[in-house]
Image (tube, grey):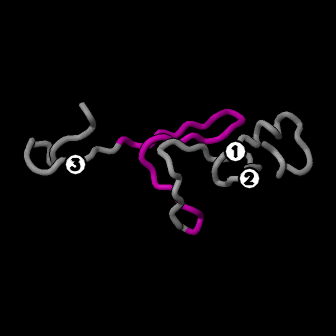
Amino acid sequence: MDGREPAGGTGAGPVVQKHAPATVVVCQDGPIIIRGDYDLRSQTDEPIDPQRKTIAICRCGRSLMKPFCDGSHIWARNGGHGDRSDRT
């Protein structure tokens, strides 16, 4: 089965794509991982285009790509101090 079925489930009419609900995983000492169909918005209700179906949302507040995680929690956990702008 490919996740599609005819509208109304009767076998007649246009094909309608079924959407899987989003799955949210909270990683210990890491980001929130969101997979599936979701609507990402700012605190002012502006849409944010994630550009993919699976994203990692920063929880530590140190990401240079907010709201997305850039791995800064690992840098901070390992005792990182000072300017992070030159991280690779």
Q: Which mark is residue 64?
A: 2
User: Where is 42 relative to 27, above or below?
Assistant: below
Give how far apart the Cα atoms at labels 1 and 3 are: 36 Å
Query: 30 and 13: which one is in front?
Result: 13
Rendered residue at 83%/40% (across/down) = 76
Give the magenta range: 20-44
The answer to which of marks 1 and 3 sits earlier in the sequence is: 3
Rendered residue at 47%/39% (across/down) = 23
Check disc 3 and report the residue beneath it.
16
Element under disc 1: loop
Q: Which mark is residue 37?
A: none
Relative to residue 6, is residue 86 drawn left or right? right
Q: Position of residue 47 (x, y in %)?
A: 51, 63
Q: Position of residue 72 (x, y in %)?
A: 76, 43
Relative to residue 41, is residue 31 drawn left or right? right
Q: Which mark is residue 70?
A: 1
